Structure formats: structure tokens, C-alpha cells
Amino acid sequence: MAASMASQAVARGLRAATSKHLLLDKCKCTQLNPRRWLNLQEYQSKKLMQESGVAVQRFYVADTASEALEAAKRLNAKEIVLKAQILAGGRGKGVFDSGLKGGVHLTKDPAVVGELANKMLGFNLTTKQTPKDGVKVKTVMVAEALDISRETYFAILMDRACNGPVMVGSPQGGMDIEEVAAKSPELIFKEVIDIFEGVRDDQALRMAANLGFKGPLERQAADQIKRLYDLFLKVDATQVEVNPLGETPEGQVVCFDAKINFDDNAEFRQKAVFAMDDMTESDPTETEAAKWDLKYIGMDGNIACFVNGAGLAMATCDIIDLHGGKPANFLDLGGGVKERQVYEAFKLLTADPKVEAILVNIFGGIVNCAIIANGITKACRELELKVPLVVRLEGTNVHEAKRILSESGLPITAADDLDDAAKKAVAAIKK
């Protein structure tokens, strides 16, 4: 059975804040949206590249208009670009609630930088990718504006088909690479990287030539490609995408804009990188859930889904949808569950005014159902639960768990299976 709209929404939620990977097999192009938890601002990505010897524009970061003005003076550049730092795309066409149009501005006058920053900092910037009220800008990047005589696209990413990293490039940069792949597949070039050998000189030079760099620029571009691969390994990236990798009239190869995706499983050895994560633009509920090692995805319905495992979450959302209900979210407990996590989970769910019923669907493998039951009863009493609660438990220690719930004296509706649970949850909100 095809996945319902509900499960598709969950899947999109699990892939929140992602960027598209291109996996290219000859002339075929497939888009994958991997999960990405770590979000860095543009200036943070540029700093990581700078530290690995990758050529980027000279830049400073400012939190106040006076700092921005001072930074513009220190740059001593022919032209300066001022960029509002938010995680959403489409900044250039965004609008501030101060009345200023555009989150990206070019000027040759340093004094103008201070005036523009004054209309950016502390104000909300609304783009096609932000919430309707926009996102408050707390930081701006003041950078040297360089002319670009030619733009190319370059990326290094993990490709399952090749069991490792792959370089992907195109001489058609500065635009939607998926569109280039669809309309002109002959302009997409791919080099498989041997994870043990790394990027060979001949591979880097061949990619540079395919990107259209000529003469001394070919060697310069090849050097940048190898440095980008060093960065890819250094920070445990799943993707380093540079668009554009540009050529200046002065004969420089520069990474003008980059997006770096990280392997969240490598957080234990990338503490400095993950400490840069900007959580200010994240959903407050998701941020709070993460503190308790819970995965929370908000949706638009009115039945809260409290599960253990993303697959079970999607199945739960699907069957609620099948019976005419709409999931308000799903909240994934994961494996190593403790009573406190269950309590905190209920706090998050009951804080959502959209929630009119809660469906608990737990399949206890490594999860002890009795721990879940104790957490549920504690939460119901202390939080004085006001909405109907339907509970379906199966697996480890389930008989003890059912005894705890039945003897609690709380108005908890037990369900025999997932279908029964979904029916009862939907019925509860229709009463």
C-alpha cells in the first residue's frame, strides 16, 4: 500500500533542514533527501573552509551596526557585500519588518554598511523558506565582494552505489544543479573516490578541466578540489557542495557559497563543529525534545503519536489517517527509555493546544513496557491529563505494564492492536 500523506509528512519531517544530494549514474539523476540535524550559518561554513585552506572571500561577522561599519572599513575592499545570517534560503529577495528589502546588499561605501546593518539586526527577515513572521536576524556577515567571470558547480558527497565518496561537477554553476542534470546530463561529470587512496592528482585535474578551468586556473582549481576533500574528511561530512565555485577576472578560483552536511553519528568526535549548531531558529519543541534524547516532529492534526521507532511512527500516522484522523505529531522515544523521558514526552505533547487525544503505541523489544507504563501513570497524575489517552503496548514485560495501567485508576483506554488503538483515538476526538 502506498504511503499516506501522513507518513510522507513524517518522512519529510525526519529529513528536516536537508539539502538535496545528487547521485549520478551515467545520464540518470536521482535525488535523495538525507536527514540533517546540524545547521550552520554561512559564515560558520566559510570559517571551516578557511581553516582547511579553501579560498573564500575575506569576511567578518558583526552583531551590531557599529561592528559592521568597523568591519567594512577594515576590509578596505572596492566593493562590500552585507549578508543577513539566517538558515533559510532566499535571503536576497526577503523583506525585513523594518521596511528594508533584501537580506543581501552590495555597496562601495563602508558608511552604507552601518546604515543597512542597522535595519537588519534585531529585525525579522521573511523569505519563501521562513515562517510567515520571518526570522530575527542577530548576526550579519560583512565580506569582500568579488566579481565572478564564470561560475561552476562542485560537490563531494557519499554515494551508496559507489560505497563511498564521489565528486560531482558541472561547468554550469550558480543555478539549480538538478535542472542542469535533467536538461543537459552531458554537462554533469562524476569521479568516484577511493576512500583509501583519496583524490588523486589526475582525478582533480580531470575534474578541473571538465569544469572548464584552463591554463594556470586548472591547477589552481585542482588544488581547491583536493582541499575540499580534506575538509570533507576532517569534519566527517556527508556532503560539501560549492555553488558557485567561481573564477574571478583577476585569475582566482574562489568558493563563493557552500553548504556542508554532517554525519550526526560523528558528533562524539566533532564536538567543536557540533558546538557551532545554531538552535535559535529551530522549533522550540524539537529543541526541548532533543534535550531528553527524544525525536519530535510537529504536524497539523490533533492526535498526538507517542511511539518508539520512526517506522512505527509512520505506520501509526498512516493508520490514524486511514481511520479519518489527523496526526498532530509523532514523538519517538527510541530504545534506551527511562521513566523521566516518558514524563518529559507527555509534557511536550500536552503543551500543544492542537492535541485533543494521545495515542501511545509501543512495541517493546529492547524497551521495557513496564517502564513506559510507570512513566505514563506518573505523567497523567502530575500533569493532570485532560485529553483522552489510548495505549497499545506489546513486547517485553507487557503483562506487568498492563497491570500497572489497569490498577492505576486513571482514565486510560487500552487497545488490543494498532488498528484498534487508532479507531479508539479517532473516536475519542469525535465525542
Image (spheres, rainbow, N blue to C red):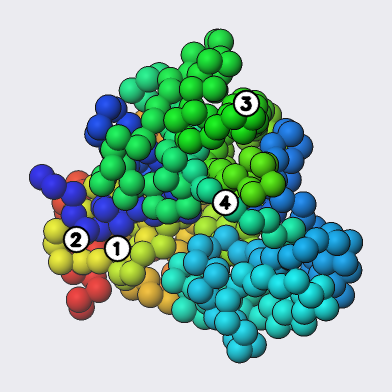
- Find out whether the residues at labels 2 and 1 contact each other: C-beta distance under 8 Å: yes
Is 156 drawn above or below residue 87 in the view shown?
A: above
Q: Which residue is mark 4?
A: 149
Q: Amino acid at mark 3?
A: Arg
Q: Secondary structure at mark 4?
A: loop
Q: Which residue is mark 3?
A: 219
Residue lying farthest front? Answer: 215
Tell which circle, 2 or 1, labels the residue nearer the N-terminal end. Answer: 2
Q: Secondary structure at mark 2?
A: helix
Tell which circle, 2 or 4, labels the residue nearer the N-terminal end. Answer: 4
Is 17 drawn above or below residue 139 in the view shown?
A: above
Q: Amino acid at mark 2?
A: Asp
Q: Amino acid at mark 4?
A: Ser
Q: Nearer the viewer, residue 265 or 342?
A: 265
Taking the spot 36% from the left edge, 64% from the top edge, the residue there is: 299
Q: Amino acid at mark 1?
A: Pro
Spatial CA span between label 1 and label 3 = 55 Å
